[in-house]
Image: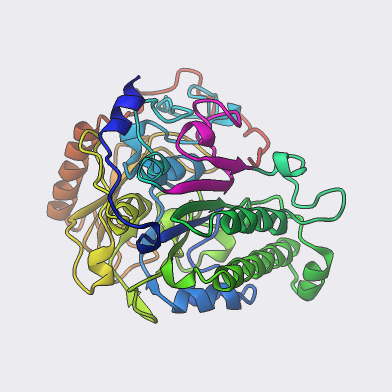
Amino acid sequence: MLRKFLFSLFIPIALHASDRPNFIIILIDDMGWKDVGFAGSNLAPTPNIDALARKGLIFKQAYSSAPNCAPTRACLMTGQYAPRHGIYTVIDDRHTPGSPQQKIMAAESKSELPSSTLTLADILKSNGYSTGMVGMWNLGRGKTGPASPLGRGFQYFTEPKALGFEKDAYLRKDGSELTDVMTDAAIKWMTEHKDGPFFLYIAPHAVHAPFEPKPELLAKYADKKDRMAAEYSATIECLDQNIGKLYAELEKLGLAKNTHIFFTSDNGGTRQFNAPLRDGKGSLYEGGIRVPAFWTGPRVQEGSISDVPVSTIDFFPTLLELAAVPSPTNQVVDGRSLLPIRDSRGLDRANLFWHFPCYTGNAKPGSAIRQGNWKLIEFFETGKPELYDLSSDPSESKDLSVANTEKTDLLLKTLHDWQKETGAAIPSGLNPKYDPNAKKRPREDR
């Protein structure tokens, strides 16, 4: 009943379908900040992604809203920081609070969005948009239940299992490749809804490990000494081919001039490819949250570049403004519309925040704030903050918290005020079951 009431607050705007833009969001899995050519990579050629990025606006300082998968996806769908919706990490046994590998009692994470929360798909659908999703949801189990994409505003949803792929597999028994098949499904849906307006959310499993690249692509990288680097490069090239195929179909259908495309990643990438950024996926250092991103579409100046820090939470208000749909008045939206950046104006935002009170991989629970070029990370195990000047030290190699106590105290207070305002879950103290000799459980990839 509550969701029906919330929907009633959104009255469709009286615009012809042809006057309203289409939207495509492409959220790559585990792609690092410079794993594509337009961001500086030499891992694999990405001519299609690079060409599409150059058609629009490249964000040089783009961030995921969290250092791992599920919370970023929740932030994308709601425009909210993680404490608002309570999804902090991917739920699996490795991350259970109180596990012997964990020094402190990590906070609990929700596995799905609150039932009263409106998603981007909810709002666009209620305003006349067709809504489709292909790929990884990770915000609730089931294909058709209330926590599934079909229960959260999407009219169409398909995933690898429905397309005949086994868990974690990139190759089907008939030799078909996952990203190819998912792209074909996205193109089919887009073609069926070409009269628009539509919102298509593409969340491929690429470029997440374990890799299973096409043999012919893997052979191109046989000269790489590192087997993982070869497999990763081949996986990136396959993704690039499919981005090219998707955009070619968009042009063929005559939709390119009226479609906004947003491209980014759900978290930072693999540590070995992240230099000079520190660390990688799961971490609140730059390597864990800095991601590649661009926006191309109507009135977006070709070849434009922005150094303004932006975040996943910003896509929600951006799409709503482009669609001439008001943001929900009874739901906090933390993101900022990116239209001022498109129009060469500044973004009215003093701070960006992250909150990750959980364990995952090698990462430790923490919270972070970026204010201008200053970034502070609070580590909950020690209670000690670290302070960095990203303008002179993007590698976060020089902790200035002792040398600049005034800035440290100011940012820490601002961070703590934000934690209280958002109701952020804080780890509750030492873990009585902590065992420094406990072995980490084997990795479960998805």
Given residues 231 and 331, the one toward you in this image is 331
The residue depicted at 48 percent of the width and 46 percent of the height is 131
Considering every residue shown, the one lying at the far bottom of the view is 303
Q: Is residue 194 visible?
A: yes
Q: Main secondary structure of the magenta part?
A: loop
Does the stretch in magenta take in 138? yes
Q: Quadrant of the N terminus?
A: top left
Q: Position of residue 352 (x, y in %)?
A: 26, 52
Q: Position of residue 93 (x, y in %)?
A: 59, 26
Q: Quadrant of residue 424?
A: top left
Q: Horizontally, is 112 left or right of 8 in the view?
A: right
Given residues 395 and 177, the one toward you in this image is 177
Q: Position of residue 41 (x, y in %)?
A: 55, 74
Q: Quadrant of the C terminus?
A: top right
Q: Quadrant of residue 164?
A: top right
Q: Is residue 40 visible?
A: no
In the image, which residues are magenta?
Answer: 129-158
Does the stretch in magenta take in 307? no
Q: Answer above or below: position of 419 versus 31.
A: above
Q: Position of residue 295 (x, y in %)?
A: 40, 67
The residue depicted at 63 percent of the width and 77 percent of the height is 45
Considering every residue shown, the one lying at the far right of the view is 174
The residue depicted at 29 percent of the width and 31 percent of the height is 8
Given residues 398 and 182, the one toward you in this image is 182
